[in-house]
Image (tube, grey):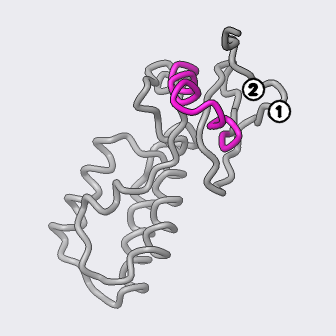
Amino acid sequence: MKKLERCSETGINAFDLIGLPVTSDDLIKTEEMLKVNYGVEYPAEKMNMLFAMIKQENWTSARLQATARWFLMNKKFPNWTVSDWFDYQVKLYPYSWYMTEIHKNREADKDMEMYKINGKIMFRYRDGTDLPFEKVEEANKQPKWRPKG
């Protein structure tokens, strides 16, 4: 997973690690869902711009499905912009991010989950989203540093 190797303190969208790249069928289904939900026929230019940006960002079909589901549940009005589609993310972060968060607040790890993905440990704050990765037990999630004194 090349994307996981490039993960930095800014994190990586977990859905970019799942599944295959978006297909034309995925995009057609998404457009149909929007039409049915909002009762609006969107201009081809708007849909083409959205889908071009999704492809440029190398979205997976899993990311598109999760985002479309979130979109339909949270965007009440048919007047959306392309940027609205990039609001939903479930971020995973490396150990360096975890240590930064722990140094800010030693209790932060109580609200975090830890996953093992291709041998790499990744962290995130719990938000109720289920991810299809191996979850590491809480007992193993201890920082390697100990406060002095």
Q: Residues within 10 Å of mark 1 (few under 14, many from 20)?
A: few
Is 105 part of what is drawn in magenta? yes
Query: Where the N terminus falls, by quadrant?
Result: top right
Which contiguous range is marked in magenta? 95-112
Give the structural element (helix, strand or loop) at label 2. loop
Q: Is residue 124 left or right of residue 47?
A: right
* 101 left or right of 37 in image: right
- Residue with the mark numbered 2: 141
61 or 111, nearer to the observer: 111
Q: Position of residue 36 (x, y in %)?
A: 42, 86
Give the residue pinned by disc 1: 137
Q: Nearer the viewer, residue 92 or 110?
A: 110
Tag shown at residue 11: none
Q: Residue at x 32, y 50 (%)?
A: 54
Badge 1 amino acid = Glu
Taking the spot 61% from the left edge, 32% from the top edge, the residue there is 123
- Is label 2 or label 1 in front? 2
In this rendering, would 114 be left or right of 137? left
Kind of residue at badge 2: Lys
Say few, some or many: other residues with alpha carbon within 10 Å of mark 2 (under 14 / 14 to 19 / 20 or more).
some
Element at badge 1? Answer: loop
Q: Quadrant of residue 79?
A: bottom left
Is residue 82 part of the magenta span, yes or no? no
Residue at the spot 32% in from the left edge and 46% down from the top edge: 55
Quadrant (top left/top right/bottom left/bottom right) for the C terminus: top right
Q: Is residue 55 above or below residue 87?
A: above
Considering depth in this image, is 124 or 118 the residue closer to the camera?
124
Q: Are marks 2 and 1 in contact (CB under 8 Å)?
A: yes
Real-space Cα separation, disc 2 to disc 1, in angstroms: 7 Å
Q: Nearer the viewer, residue 45 or 70?
A: 70
Q: Residue at x 66, y 44 (%)?
A: 111
